[in-house]
Amino acid sequence: MMFLFQAKCIKQMEGLTQRCIFRWSLTPYARYSDTSQKKSKLAPLQERRMIDKCKIFAKAGDGGSGCSSLRKGRPDGGNGGKGGDVILECSPRVWDFSGLQRHLIAEKGGHGSSKKLIGSRGADKVARVPLGTVLHLVNGDIPSVVKTQSSTDVDPWDIPGALVNDLPDPGYNSTSTDTRGELKATHSIGCSLTQAEETNAKKSRHAASTDAFSQLSTFDGAPEFCTKDIEENQEIIYNVAELTEEGQQIVIARGGEGGLGNVASSKDSRKSMTMKGGSCQSIPNLRDPNSIHSSLHAGLPGVETVLILELKSIADVSFVGMPNVGKSTLLGAISRAKPAVGDYAFTTLRPNLGNLNYDDLSITVADIPGLIKGAHQNRGLGHAFLRHIERTKVLAYVVDLAAALNGRKGIPPWEQLRELILELEYHQDGLSNRPSLIIANKIDEEGASEVYKELKRRVQGVPIFPVCAVLGEGIADLKAGLKMLVNAETSYKLCLDQILIA
Ligand SMILES: Nc1nc2c(ncn2[C@@H]2O[C@H](COP(=O)(O)OP(=O)(O)OP(=O)(O)O)[C@@H](O)[C@H]2O)c(=O)[nH]1
């Protein structure tokens, strides 16, 4: 018998080891395989794709019940413990919402007991979210507390309009000026709202929806849920808070207070007490709202909140360009990222990220989905990706030198640049006003060199890097140029005046 058991164990161990070896041998292939090969479901691009928006349900812990107990004729029942809070904590080690639980449920408080023992406090549920997480309220209370665990501030450059100094003490209302000098109304809980947003928020003050769990279940388990569904079907209070600082915590659902034990409540309710004997008794009709007892002794329920979390990405560099100009190919050429590349517009649906490594520095580059005319009115992929650009230090405009060559229906690069700047500015005043350079891609195409010369003539004051992303040509110079801009060793900005169209 013993022998049989040992044999079984050894067999299981062997199977496990084989599976481990199999995994080890698969991983490098899965990570660095060429995307032109047949894509597997484990393709690394999928792993790196950001989940930049998600809906969560938070349920704070209910307060524990107070105890009614008499010992030697005197009340000695302790209070119930407070329920745990649901807290979001800002962490630079989390990049997106892919690892975030969609149901966040804090622990209930413990019940009080005799000998004046207070119930245990329910444990808080703390979930970590990335820097730059913006909260939109679907249902429940507006988050009410902001605490900061660490003093390491984010470089204000990283988060335009969300300076750490913008965050006032809880309960304090003020106005403040953001990095671009715009006056902002500052929300009492530490979020900043523009006046337009504030009006919007007031307009869209929602009627609390009935069943938070059932709302959520529509989206649970579907990371790329349909944003439109949420925005069309529900009234949302936008931008109720923003997490911008490492260690910053915000309580999104408060735990219920514990009920009073009869030691605490005896003063008020002594006359109405009907306790008999000396042992600890459970309170009759504890949940009956008509009973004074139950209202005093029952713990309060924890708050339930439904929120949409949205991430404004914080990348050092964003590749901004029209669809199909080669942004994803370029990201693959300068970093180890393997984004999907296709000979059709909107191959990129969500920002892809790559790390550009230097000896002494690492830069995060975001490949933003293609921008088209009317994007600011939500055409194409519209607002979704324009928001990511808001949080980028450096803009790298990518243009296709061959877009209008050889009978193609595209527009010349200088017009591409003009359209791009206009879309950024329509979306948000001053969005294009940051260090920039131009990447002139597809220099390998026939006739592209002449277009490049023309581009240099028409656009001045900003460095232009001719590259061939597919062959990796011009990449070394481009990397050096990006490093200088990110390090603020040079500062060029592209504006409409610098582009000669006629
Ligand atoms: N000839 C040439 N073709 C290129 C070059 N770079 C990219 N391409 C091609 O251009 C097409 C579009 O490339 P992508 O990298 O998907 O373009 P994108 O800008 O990311 O496209 P969206 O996802 O629509 O925004 C693909 O067929 C690429 O092979 C280049 O340097 N030279």
Image (cartoon, helix red, strand yellow):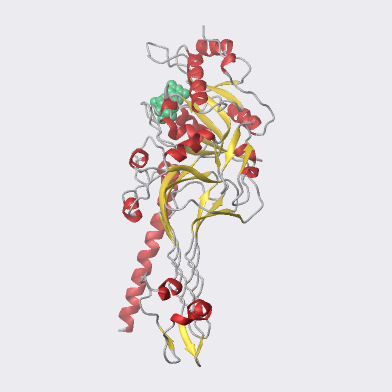
| Quarter of the image where one finds residue 288 | bottom left
From the viewer's perspective, tell me whether residue 130 is left or right of residue 181.
left
From the viewer's perspective, tell me whether residue 183 is left or right of residue 219.
right
Instruction: Give the image location of residue 127, x and y in percent.
Output: 49, 56
Taking depth in this image into account, of 367 and 126 the one nearest to the observer is 126
Instruction: Give the image location of residue 271, x and y in percent.
Output: 46, 81
From the viewer's perspective, tell me whether residue 14 is left or right of residue 202.
left
Residue under the point 58% across and 13% down = 456
Instruction: Give the image location of residue 158, x and y in percent.
Output: 60, 38
Taking depth in this image into account, of 198 and 389 the one nearest to the observer is 198
Taking depth in this image into account, of 358 and 158 the one nearest to the observer is 158
Instruction: Say if 390 sits above or below 235 in the image.
Output: above
Residue projecting furthest to the front:
271
Quadrant where the N terminus sits is bottom left
Instruction: Give the image location of residue 46, x and y in percent.
Output: 40, 43
Instruction: Say if 155 sits above or below 481 in the image.
Output: below
Residue projecting furthest to the right:
489
From the viewer's perspective, tell me whether residue 48 is left or right of residue 391.
left
Residue projecting furthest to the top:
502
Any part of residue 78 in sight: no
Instruction: Say if 63 sits above or below 403 in the image.
Output: below
Instruction: Say if 474 sits above or below 497 in the image.
Output: below
Residue under the point 47% across and 72% down = 259
Taking the image as four quarters, which one is ligand 1 found in?
top left
Any part of residue 226 in sight: yes
| Quarter of the image where one finds residue 276 | bottom left
| Quarter of the image where one finds residue 455 | top right
